[in-house]
Structure formats: structure tokens, C-alpha cells
Amino acid sequence: MFMRVWKDTWQWLLSTRMGWIIAVIGCGVMGGIFVGNSLLARALAGLAGAIIAIVLILGVVYLIHLLFVTPNRLRKEQRRKYIENNASYIPFIFGNPIKKKYTKILSTLESLIKIENEFTDSVVGRHQLT
């Protein structure tokens, strides 16, 4: 699960380059303005601020994915895989009652899973850090 969270975190972070730029430049400039008197001290403070911004972005996005986004995705994927593995339409023709039940579940949940995916994607889209 942690590898999946890390993968989802990097996918999200790579798709939002503007957040990286704003955070790094913002923290770098703030560190450079308010810390130090000489040019070297301000440059080092800006570099430290930019590094801190990168670490904070990675940490916050990783925690958000770990707690909210990835567990829902994994549950939906496992549910879909279970239903697909247990709902073959061929035994439905031959009258297997257990397979009939799974095919009904699959056809019923297909639209619900689609709605749930759209809702989750829209909620995740509203909670962007940038």
C-alpha cells in the first residue's frame, strides 16, 4: 500500500508543476528576505526555505494520499477485480445460481462504481494544494 501511495503522490505532484514553482520560489524569497544581512546569508536562507518547501509539499501530499485518496482507490479496484473474477457471463447461460448472483451484482454495481469514481475524482480535484 505504501508503494501505491508513493506512486499516487508522485503522479499528482508531477501533474501540478505550478505548485512546485510557487512554493519553492515563495519560500525561497521569504527566507531570503527575512533572514540574514549579507548576500550569502540571504542566498543560503532562500535555499533552505526552498528545500523546506519541497519537504513539506512531499509530506503533506503523501499524508493526504495515505489517509484519504489511495485507500478508496484500492478498495474500488479490489471490489471491481473481485466482481470481475466471480462474475463470468458464460456460466450465466448454463444456469449456475451463484454466478447468476454475481452477474446481477456486476451489472448493478457498474453504474454505482462509475458514479463513485467520478465523485472521488471531483472531491480530490477540489482539494489541490496549489
Image (spheres, rainbow, N blue to C red):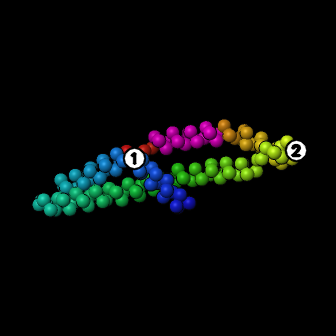
What amino acid type is highlighted by mark number 2?
Phe
- Total numbered circles: 2
Viewport quadrant of the N terminus: bottom right
Please give left or right for residue 121 compared with residue 109 in the image.
left
The C terminus, quarter of image: top left
From the viewer's perspective, is residue 40 above or below residue 106? below
Mark identifier at residue 94: 2
Q: Residue furthest front?
A: 90
User: Residue 27 — which label?
Assistant: none
Residue extending furthest toward the right: 95
Q: Is residue 21 left or right of residue 118?
A: left
124 to 74, vertically: above or below = above
Residue 16 is marked as: 1
> Hey, which quadrant is residue 127 in on the image?
top left
Q: Residue at x 34, y 45 (%)?
A: 18
Return the x and y of residue 64 as percentages of the image width and height: 47, 52
From the image, state whether disc 2 or disc 1 is nearer to you: 2
Magenta span: predominant SS is helix
Q: Residue 112: image x %, image y %?
A: 66, 39
User: Which comes before the other along the chain, label 2 or label 1?
Assistant: 1
Which image quarter: residue 106? Answer: top right
Residue 40 vs 97, above or below: the answer is below
Q: What percent of the width, then of the height, locates residue 82? A: 71, 52
Q: Is residue 63 visible?
A: no
Q: Residue flagged by tag 1: what amino acid is it?
A: Thr
Q: Does dot 2 land on a helix, a strand or a loop?
A: helix
Asked whether, in this view, residue 45 is left or right of residue 53, the answer is left
Q: Is residue 108 visible?
A: yes
Spatial distance from mark 2 to mark 1, Cα to Cα? 51 Å
- Where is residue 10? Give x, y as percent: 44, 54
Bounds of the magenta segment: 112-126
